[in-house]
Image: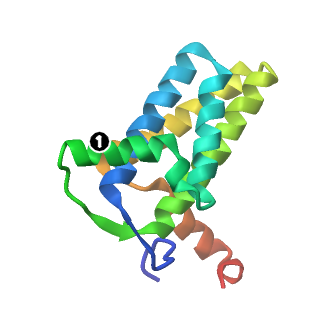
Amino acid sequence: MAQQCPLIFRQVDATVVRINTLFVVLGIIGFMVTYNTLIVSFLIVDFFLRLYGYKQFSPINRGSLLIQQKLSLGIKMEDAGAKRLAAFFGLVFSIFLLAGTLLNAYAAVTVIGGIFLFCASLELFFGYCVACKIYYIAKKIYPKWFE
């Protein structure tokens, strides 16, 4: 079985996704430095908007589109499945960061934030999608769940 990403046969611009990831990485770093719950709350709302069909209201997505236009960056279309799965993981990580902070579990917040930052940085700098790899492994372990 060849490695595969979750395909939903809808395309997204990978350039915009990587700019989105830049904003997320900056947000994670800002949060990890300050532990300001407003930053991670903003990320939660923004991930939610992008995941559930309200991309036009997402400040991160709007900013990314503006940057792409102003810098005349190219368009590179990719299947949206893996990017959607990665955004879902980003939402879950952000919720865990908020919960950990509210529970004063700063050791857990540091570990979760570090993993989140590492995964987002791989996408940002190398275009390497950790969500694709997790999807592939989970599909091998639980094939009936994905039918």
Q: Judge from the rendering whether residue 68 lies leftward or rightward of residue 140; answer left or right.
A: left
Q: Residue furthest right?
A: 103
Residue at 25%, 48% in the rendered image: 69
Q: Is residue 13 above or below residue 117?
A: below
Circle 1: residue type = Ile
Disc 1 element: helix
Residue at (56, 21) in percent of width and height: 32
Residue beneath disc 1? 67
Q: Residue at x 58, y 43 (%)?
A: 46
Q: Is residue 122 visible?
A: no
Q: Quadrant of residue 112?
A: top right
> x and y percent of residue 90 in the render?
58, 46
Above or below residue 72? Residue 132 is below
Quadrant hosting residue 141? bottom right
User: Which x, y percent locates residue 96?
Assistant: 71, 37
Task: Name the foreground residue: 116 vs 9.
Answer: 9
Mark 1: few/some/many CA within 10 Å (<14, 14-19, 20+):
some
Q: Is residue 54 visible?
A: yes
- Residue 81 in picture, x, y percent from top left: 50, 69
Residue 63 is situated, as x and y percent measured from the top left of the image, at: 39, 40
Q: Would residue 32 be found to the left or right of residue 72 on screen?
A: right
Indicate whether 129 appears above or below 92: below
Q: Is residue 84 left or right of residue 112?
A: left
Q: Is residue 18 left or right of residue 138?
A: left
Q: Nearer the viewer, residue 42 or 144?
A: 42
